[in-house]
Amino acid sequence: MINLKGKDILDGAQFTREDIDYIMALADDFRTQLRNKPAIDLMRGYILATLFFEPSTRTRLSFETAMHRLGGNVIGFSSAESTSTAKGETLADTIRTVDQYADIIAMRHPQIGSAREAASVAKAPVLNGGDGAGQHPTQALLDLYTIQTELGKVDGTTIVLCGDLKNGRTVHAGVELYKHYKCRLIMVAPDQLKMPAEIVAKLRAHNIQVTETDNLEKALAEGDILYMTRIQKERFADVAEYERLKDSYILTRAMVERIRPNLTIMHPLPRVNEITPDVDTLPTAAYFRQVGNGVFIRMALIAAVMGMPV
Ligand code: CP
């Protein structure tokens, strides 16, 4: 029996395969229910706080959409400058304060470990919407759900992870989920932006086949899914290094058509240059459907941690 009531959602490693199956089934259920009506009266009277100390479009707005679609209410902020953080308030005190107002907290913060720190002082469940270059577990779940909905399966697939695998929190969280499946991972990155060695070692210890390369075209020839990521400018101490690396990989429509016409193309977004706009109209370009899936997955997570009967 899966029971996520009262749980914080902090990193991809916390989920069992049963948790993942439960959340994806709940997301499917919400998707079906929303075909016939704009909202579900499940969270009426409850308040979600969205505390975003770092920029976001999708994560904040999809959390807010999810709560509205569940019939609940939302408070929050989208930049730290407009809050008492700018006067020197600590994260812990901000969380203790919001805990007096809200029943559930979704947050994003530039520091690795910030969501865990928040969870340690909050009574309300804390959902990590990204902690620096650390983790982004709700994105990882919606990514996995997208693979499941696009291909009908995760087992047996070859997933190409490309771009800034050192700083990308979506891939750090994602591989923690992929390790529950029989899939192969090809990691494509320049030397400076490779997936941290301890993460690769952990995957191999789980018998996940991992190949590391800097050659995107060779990887695409073997891949079922490309999970492209942005080079994370905001994580670079040296701007010149970012400038050298920012266009390491650019996926074009011609590449897809020449190398792997059936490739399912995903991206957590935002993109900069790494997927050219002519890719967008390919039927297998899934990244905007991926965005939509974020609402169903976040509805499922909110309902699950609030212990709502569904
Ligand atoms: N995928 C994602 O985290 O997007 P935002 O930065 O817009 O929230």
Image: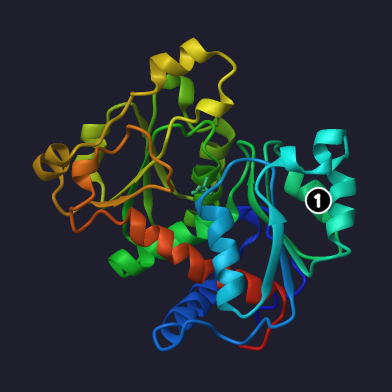
Instruction: Residue 200: give x, y in percent of width and height.
Output: 51, 38
CB at mark 1 closer than 8 A to ligand 1?
Answer: no
Instruction: Residue 261: give x, y in percent of width and height.
Output: 13, 50
Instruction: Residue 195: give x, y in percent of width and height.
Output: 49, 33
Instruction: Residue 308: give x, y in percent of width and height.
Output: 68, 83
- Residue 8 showing in the rendered view: no
The amino acid marked with disc number 1 is Ala
Task: Looking at this view, name the residue that lies furthest to the top.
Answer: 240
Name which residue lies at 53% across and 61% down.
62
Name which residue lies at 38% across and 55% down.
183
Question: Is 302 placed above or below 163 here?
Answer: below
Question: Is 4 placed above or below 281 here?
Answer: below
Q: Quadrant of residue 64?
A: bottom right
Task: Looking at this view, name the residue that lies furthest to the left.
Answer: 258
Q: Quadrant of the N terminus?
A: bottom right
Q: How is the image coloured?
A: rainbow
Instruction: For mark 1, give the secondary structure.
Output: helix
Question: Which residue corresponds to mark 1?
Answer: 118
